[in-house]
Image: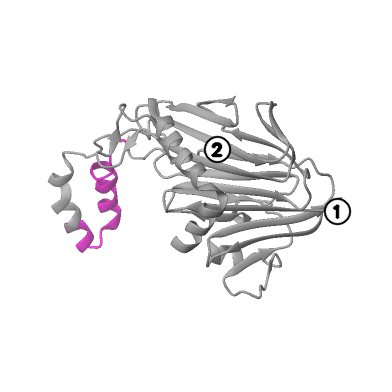
Amino acid sequence: ICLALLSLAGSAKTATHNNTLWYNQPAKVWEEALPIGNGRLGAMVFGNPFHETIQLNEESLWSGAPINSNIPAARDHLDKIRELVLDHNYVEANKLVARYMVGTPPMVRSYQTFGNLLLDYQVKDTTAYRRSLDLSQGLSLTTFSTDGIDFAQEVFASAIDDVIVTQLTASEKGGLNVLVSLKRDKDATVKVVGNEIIMEGQVIDQDSPLAGKGGKHMRFAAKLRILHKGGKIEEKDGGIYISGAKEATLLWRGATDYNLSQLNFDRSIDPLAICEQVISQAEKLGYKKLHNRHIANH
C-alpha cells in the first residue's frame, strides 16, 4: 500500500523523516487514503478537513457462512487431468478442471468493511493543511488552520490495547466543534446513548448461483465512545455534536460473533459486550497512555 501511495504522481512530498509520508491535499479516492491497523482492526484515513471519512475494518466481518465446497468426484478425475496437462492438451484439461475441480459454489462471498466514522468539522476555509503517515510510529496525522485556530486529528490502531483511537485537538479553548457519526450502508442500526454511538446488525445476503445460499449470517457490533475536555456534547442528526471543546478522544472497537478457533459463528459470543469491555479498559488508560503504549509496542 505504501508503495502505491508513493507512486501517486505529484501528490507525495519528500519528508525530512524518511519513514513519513506526507501530502498537502486530502485523499480524493480510496487508494490515496492513509492506512493504519493493528493486524485485526484497521482504518483508511482520508484527511478531509471539512467532511472527514475514516473507513473502519475488522478482520472477521464477511457476508458468507462456513460451507463444505469440496466436490467428491474431484479425486476420480485428477489422474486424467494430469495426463492431459503432460500431453500439453490444456484445453481439454481445463474443461475437466472447470467441471470437477472448482468448488461448489465456485465463489466465496465477500469480505465487508464495518462502515465509516464521519467527522464534520463545521469549517469553511482552511490554511496550512497537511496530512501524514508516520510509518515508524503507526500514526496518521491531519493538521490545518482556520480563523486563527490550529486543529489536529491523530488516528492510530493500538495493537496492545486493541482499539482505534482518534484524538481531536484545537489550539484555543472552546475551538473544537465537530459532528461525529457512524454510518454503514446496510444490515445495521445506529443509535446514540449518552456519549456513545452504538452500531449493531447482522449480515443478510441473497442467494446466488455463484456464491451459494444466502440468509442471515454474521452478527456484529461496534461502539464509539467520545471523551471530551471542555464544551459539551449533544445528540444531533443521528450522531453526537461536540461543541466548545478543547480536545476530544474517540475510542472505536468493532467485533463479530465469528469464532476464529472454530472457524464458525458462535451465537454465545456477544459482540457488543466485547466492545464495551475493550473500550472501558481503554478509557481508564486515557489518551496519553494509549498513545505512549501504542508507540512503544509499534
Mark 1 residue crowding within 10 angstroms, few (<14) / some (14–19) / many (20+): few
Residues rendered magenta in the picture? 83-105
Location of residue 173 with respect to 211 vertically, above or below: below
Distance CA(mark 2)–CA(mark 1): 33 Å
Q: Nearer the viewer, mark 2 or mark 1?
A: 1
> Can residue 74 be spotted in the picture?
yes
Residue 58, picture quadrant: top left
The front one of 83 and 280 is 280
Q: Residue furthest toward the right?
A: 147
Residue 242 is situated, as x and y percent measured from the top left of the image, at 71, 36
Secondary structure under the numbered disc 2 in the rendered image: strand
At 84% from the left and 45% from the top, the residue drawn is 124
Residue 228 is situated, as x and y percent measured from the top left of the image, at 65, 40
At 28% from the left and 43% from the top, the residue drawn is 102
Q: Which mark is residue 169?
A: none
Verify whether residue 49 appears in magenta: no
Secondary structure under the numbered disc 1 in the rendered image: loop
Q: Which mark is residue 148?
A: 1
Viewed as shown, does residue 8 lie left or right of 187?
Answer: right
